[in-house]
Image: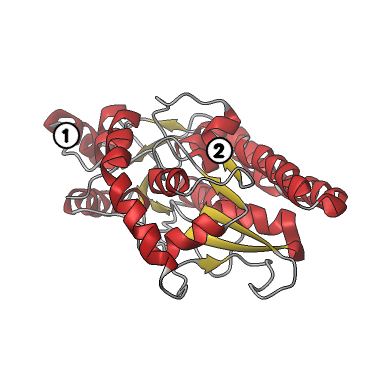
Amino acid sequence: MRTRAGAQLQAALIARARRPAVAALLAGALAIPLASACSPASGGSGPAASGAIEAIGAENEYASVISQVGGSYVHVDAIMSNPSTDPHAYEASPAVAREIAAARLIVQNGVGYDTWATTILNAAPDPARKVINVQRLLGRPDGTANPHLWYDPATMPKVASAVAAALAEIDPPHAAYFRASAARFTGSLAAWNSALKAFKSAHPGAPVATTEPVADYMLDAAGAHNLTPWAFQVNIMNGVDPAPQDVAAVKALLTGHKVKAFLYNQQVTSPLTESFIATASASRVPVVGVYETMPTPGYDYQSWMLAEVRALASAIAGQASTPHL
């Protein structure tokens, strides 16, 4: 059974327990060549580019934003980019630790989602390094129940502005370029926002069910009504067996045709979630796969979000399943 760092207290305890191991990991990293386990974000320059700012997105959706704001003036790597990996269970390698320690700009999610990055940063402090913790940027408390902040339409415009400001401090001569790129990125989210508004207008209160709260912020913005018990979503997210009554309630949503779509975390499944996918299919409830990290190649952040809304609309309006983007 997978284990996820859901609560902040749990995340803090894990970070504290791993601190000596991370220090050793960093020390080892200095003695080996960097065989990067990271993935370059599209649009960034190569690592050998003269004067390029080394930047990291702990998750590749944030790396996508950094790349679009920084353009050729940054070399961006994404730590979490494999759609087959459970981000909550990730542990950094020595190569990753070395790259994080050397970066001049880092964007991480926070809310206990990527505590491994915080632990590495604390073990290799650098006052010149710019760190954007999206949770802190948004002013969300440590007890925020849903850590998937990038699905909230209000998140990435603020991230882009913060990235532009950080890059401007690192590279003042190109400050105007970074600000203009951030504004251009925010403008490019118009198609996603329009799709959300159109869905909300066409399908107000559309009932859906989910395995966990990966896309809940987007569902809220689209005006959909998630009928899944919150305790069930949290338990599945944290790798805990949900209560029998919650399992029965979700099954009844599907077999009783009380929902028009069933959304599941495409990256991490278990025998239980797979049984719900099978039940949804047998009950002719369209199934939509959602992702915690941006599917690659072929997507940037905004095209990914737009594809997710279109998949939801296809399920509600056309009864079409989209298990994979």
Horizontal and vertical percent for residue 89?
Answer: 30, 51
Image position of 206 with respect to 289: above or below: above
As drawn, is 42 to the left or to the right of 324?
right
Q: Is residue 186 visible?
A: yes
Regarding mark 2 in the picture, which secondary structure is present there? Answer: helix
Horizontal and vertical percent for residue 86?
Answer: 33, 54
Regarding mark 1 in the picture, which secondary structure is present there? Answer: helix
Image position of 306 with respect to 238: above or below: below
Q: Residues within 10 Å of mark 1 (few under 14, many from 20)?
A: few
**Image disc number at residue 60:** none
Q: Is residue 303 visible?
A: no
Horizontal and vertical percent for residue 119?
Answer: 40, 45
How many numbered discs sit on the rendered protein?
2
Residue at x 56%, y 33% (from the top left corner):
221
Inter-mark Cα distance, 1 to 2: 36 Å
Horizontal and vertical percent for residue 104?
Answer: 62, 53
- Residue behind mark 1: 248
Nearer the observer, 318 or 212: 212
Nearer the observer, 128 or 177: 128
Label located before the other in sequence (1 or 2): 2
Q: Nearer the viewer, mark 1 or mark 2?
A: 2
- Residue behind mark 2: 134
Residue at x 29%, y 52% (from the top left corner):
21
Among all residues in the image, which is located at the extreme left? 244
Q: Amino acid at mark 1?
A: Ala
Q: Quadrant of residue 35?
A: bottom left
Q: Amino acid at mark 2?
A: Val
